[in-house]
Amino acid sequence: MAKPLIRDRGSRLLEAAQTEPGSPLVGILGTGDFSRSLARRLVASGHQVVVGSRNPKRSAALFPDEAEVMSQLEAASQADIVFVALFPEHYSSLVELKQVLGGRVLVDVSNGLCLNQDGPSNAEQLADMFPESHVVKGFNTISAWALQSGPRDGSRQVFLCSDSSVAKASVSQLCRRMGFIPIDMGPLSASLEIENMPLYLFPSWKLPVLLSFALFIFFYLYNFIRDVLHPYVTSGKSAFYKMPIELVNVTLPCVALVMLTLVYVPGLCAAFLQLWWGTKYKRFPDFLDKWLIQRKQFGLCSFLCAALHMIYITLYDVFYIFSLLIYLFIHLQVKNGIEDSWVSEDVWRMELYVSVGIMAIGLLSLLAVTSLPSVANTVNWREFSFIQSSLGHCALFMATLHTCLFGWTRAFDAKQYHFYLPPTFLLVVIPPVSVLIFRSLLFLPCVALKLRKIRRGWEKTRHIRFTLPDEDCSSPQLSKCV
Amino acid sequence: MAKPLIRDRGSRLLEAAQTEPGSPLVGILGTGDFSRSLARRLVASGHQVVVGSRNPKRSAALFPDEAEVMSQLEAASQADIVFVALFPEHYSSLVELKQVLGGRVLVDVSNGLCLNQDGPSNAEQLADMFPESHVVKGFNTISAWALQSGPRDGSRQVFLCSDSSVAKASVSQLCRRMGFIPIDMGPLSASLEIENMPLYLFPSWKLPVLLSFALFIFFYLYNFIRDVLHPYVTSGKSAFYKMPIELVNVTLPCVALVMLTLVYVPGLCAAFLQLWWGTKYKRFPDFLDKWLIQRKQFGLCSFLCAALHMIYITLYDVFYIFSLLIYLFIHLQVKNGIEDSWVSEDVWRMELYVSVGIMAIGLLSLLAVTSLPSVANTVNWREFSFIQSSLGHCALFMATLHTCLFGWTRAFDAKQYHFYLPPTFLLVVIPPVSVLIFRSLLFLPCVALKLRKIRRGWEKTRHIRFTLPDEDCSSPQLSKCV
Amino acid sequence: MAKPLIRDRGSRLLEAAQTEPGSPLVGILGTGDFSRSLARRLVASGHQVVVGSRNPKRSAALFPDEAEVMSQLEAASQADIVFVALFPEHYSSLVELKQVLGGRVLVDVSNGLCLNQDGPSNAEQLADMFPESHVVKGFNTISAWALQSGPRDGSRQVFLCSDSSVAKASVSQLCRRMGFIPIDMGPLSASLEIENMPLYLFPSWKLPVLLSFALFIFFYLYNFIRDVLHPYVTSGKSAFYKMPIELVNVTLPCVALVMLTLVYVPGLCAAFLQLWWGTKYKRFPDFLDKWLIQRKQFGLCSFLCAALHMIYITLYDVFYIFSLLIYLFIHLQVKNGIEDSWVSEDVWRMELYVSVGIMAIGLLSLLAVTSLPSVANTVNWREFSFIQSSLGHCALFMATLHTCLFGWTRAFDAKQYHFYLPPTFLLVVIPPVSVLIFRSLLFLPCVALKLRKIRRGWEKTRHIRFTLPDEDCSSPQLSKCV
């Protein structure tokens, strides 16, 4: 390639581009899948890479040409930052490199096989073996796939921890150059938490799902006693065929309503605690913090139950019609005024509670859609709060109204109290009604004003205001308490 | 930490990594939540940070160790870029720093409490107070949460504006280092718009939602007059029980069909305007530009109505069956040939319009799913256009056919014209049929060819072609007009 | 702007920020939409830009002030990297610049008008014209819109290829500075593939969608013969009215079940191949690799069919009830014990298969939601595998059970074998049952252990283990085979 003289400046730049000034020489020990993907990504982001292998000749073919494959000793002595891409059980094979690795930054990228609650973490074990090296934990949550194909939204965060802040800073910078976002998790003792991260199985879903199941079982048994056992015991009528569908269908909306109520209880508690304390700078009890964070999961569990209820009711029409049919059939021969008697209170009630129920499920669907990460990312804070708080309370109100209209005057009918147990709809309507009442208390001008002042930084005791730029009605900090 | 001699090069790099060369010293005035999150993020992205506090001793504990907390005067005089993280009402407290802040870059990160249409913006007020500083507006759309936990997709854009392009460039670079994407919005006069951004409440949804409501009210009243008032006035029959469900169910598909039609009207207008003008380089009227941008919202409103219609119809079966039942009951005793008469034109018609309706809702669901930001991001332009344009027109055709099959020959039945009002399905089918006809005109070879030429840059008057690399059938520019 | 002396250090930094050291001077040839957006983005990311136009005076107004518009010759001779933003058919107009462009990096950003399978690509044609320049293909998948407004998640990847690795590296670095992620696709011969990228129309959906259609047609005809033709031929009864809804409704679940089975077949094949070979380092046959990648599409096709089946069945209630009604009507006059006879085996069977069907569709919905890119991005590998593998097999089991319960004892009823054809549910239940049986074989301790060893890198022949950090039960590499 003959370059004309005029190209002098450009070609200099081109050569400089190859290895950016100040970029560290990165070493990788190990030749597995992760190691190969890491090498490819490092090379692609402009780093010089050396790979340490126990069998350099055989491994060289697996790596990109720009990465030099050599013995582990050579790689360790040249590199500034050394990735230890070995199984933890093979760490001991590195003991012979101890002297060379002294003073270097070692990055532990290993994962555990199962949740490790007690420690020590792999990274801490590595640090014990190489006390003179600076061990940084990180990159274990990144898959080989994300390394190779470029990070996607979900895999852009790299959690780092180390006892050496200098080492951590240099790995952070490496991260950023590779297109990831480093998240500082503190000292090396956080490594256990970081190693457990990819092993968690929906930790934030555990409580909501378990609670949904518990509520389901409770209400199912309650309904079973009232609707199946009672007629069987008192009049010998067998209604066991109701178990797979009808009872499930009656139980699901109970669970949905209670779970939806539980979404709005913690915000209420937080608001009343802040009013009580007269400050927003006091920590909420742990359980409340956890609850506030899991509201989305509670809401989605509620939505799932409500959606299943809707599917059941539409599919159940077939059976429902049957019973109506027979009822009709028996009575039709007796009286003639069927058409008039039909267009009565019952029809109005039914039409109304079905309408309100559809509106409630419609609102819940909107809430569910805006819970999708990609949709939530496109709305600003005020819009998010409008949907999750205003529309959410609207949905709660509609669902409560749906239940009340379903119950109608039957709450006052002594015959409904089988075995002295109140009807299910009565039981289930109490929590949401309480939440709605307490919530409306917060709208009283005096209470609302005081709460607002507190959330802008006012404190009862100090009467000094912090000066915060975004602590206003539209600020994300409020999300914790609204 | 004893470093062996062999580590010389590596350790130099490590120290260099700590503070990148050329990275400015960043100051933050104020000690609130936002200020703390900002400090943490700046430190994490390798910047040197000083925080100016009115009470440095008390505030120091709130900030990361790497950030130095000092008096406001000290911080202001050291920093190259100063973030003003105070409530706007406290800006006046900075007057004493006026001389020190002269020539510095001041970043105004404040938000308003409510939409401010008239100005001046907070940033403009700050600029008036410190005429010798270079005020840059920005970061107000970023939450403290996004600053701390690393930007997510939705919060990666930082909108900046300033009258000093040098100041803007240096804040832009700071942005990029923090992992955000700076978007240049021009001079400081744009700050009002930037401050209003987080206060908007779904601006692009306003028109479609209001229009949907208006159409709903119109068609509801229209159907009320025809189906409830007419029988009551003419024969005294009370059909008021139809109001909560049946009328709503008849009204929803009308709104859905009209809204779906309105999705395809602006594209058609744009195409005909371009054909008329003979160029694509002339601006569309403002209302058309707005309409083109809001097509997605129109479509989703249409989908919501169609989905509710589907829910209503399935839940309404119960009531529908009832009326059929009674009808059957009365006639069954009269004639015996029920089975034969039942399998008739009416059944075919019903089966067909239900089938076509299901296909229409299926297609609309596909369109809705591909409107989700994360799905839309994974398809290329040709795929997006195939779904939104080809499948979209298909859905419009199906929905129209569904309505026509529902109407059948009743359009020609004089008895359907209650109070001389045409049946709803007739009214509602006119707009989509017109759109489909005009659309098919665009497929005529001569018209299609001319439109294509225009969209590749051809102009009637100049006969000169711009040379654009991606102005072809698959280019995003066409999105505006297809 | 009078700068006080104290500002010395700050202002130096500000000026340095404007043009980063080492950033190449970028030239753009052409003045179309893409060219303008590119110029704006380059300027915004701190690059110096020169634009080469055939009519510099007229074009200057279209570009940002920071970009200098000049003649093509001037631009080409100054720039280090030259973007060729012309239509490919105008490349020949650049011949006069041949000498100046020698040694420069030329970036070909052009797109084709339609899929080009044979080559040569536009970039290869450019390289033929300018043999002394270093042609890099890239940026063609990025829209002018993404350039201007900042890249979104979906448009962050820039695919690059070139025969000169130095040129590729410098364009890669430019990419990263602009906020994009460069993906190295190898030598210039890959440019044909890169140019075809934005022209593909859902390549991964082709097979699943076609297969769904084929299965639909097959089962539709099969059901047509059994349910419509058979009664017509044997007893002259016309059941043609069943064609639009009832037959479709019976056919859809067949397609859904077979497609769902096909999701789990390739994983099973992969596991058995690995067991057979005794290694995971042997390539799967091409068709299996393709199949493994398209499992998500197969699953979504299955979900779509199942969802349509649910809609059909709920809407079909109306018709279904009719036939039941008539049946009831005829028999009711004969026997009185209706209530007792009704609460029988048939009701239990129906209740059970409806329940199980709802559970199956509920699980499938969960699978569909977690297939959304933004949701998939937020779960870790173990969670993804739990949902797609464990819940997925659960859904397959439920769907199979649903079919079995629907069939019940009718499989053993000779009368069901119209024209000697077995009932559809029998035909359709065979593949999923086989898959479930083979799958459960993999849970046998000896088989499970061996498979696990193989997937951690063990090989039958070599008995040497690669040392891979993340090749464990929770590693993304396993996704190919689980």
Image (cartoon, coloured by chain):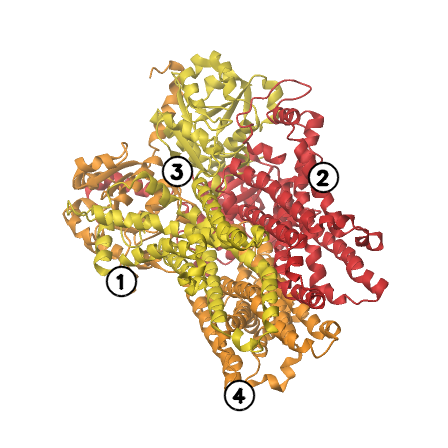
Chain colours: A yellow, B orange, C red
Whole-percent x and y of residue C84? Answer: 55, 49
- Which chain hosts label 3? C
Tell me the distance, in whole angstroms, between the alpha carbons under discs 3 and 4.
87 Å
What element does badge 2 sit on?
helix
- Nearer the observer, disc 3 or disc 4? 4
Tag 3 near tag 1, CB within 8 Å: no
Amino acid bearing label 3: Pro
Q: Mark 2 vs mark 3: same chain?
A: yes
Q: Mark 3 vs mark 4: same chain?
A: no
Horizontal side of C222 relative to C172 (left or right) equals right
Whole-percent x and y of residue B379? Answer: 57, 51
Tell me the distance, in whole angstroms, between the alpha carbons under discs 3 and 1.
39 Å
Residue C21 is labelled as: 3
Quick one: label 2, few (<14), some, or many (20+) residues within 10 Å?
A: few
Residue C434 is labelled as: 2
Q: Which residue is mark 1?
A: B119
Tell me the distance, in whole angstroms, between the alpha carbons under discs 2 and 1.
71 Å
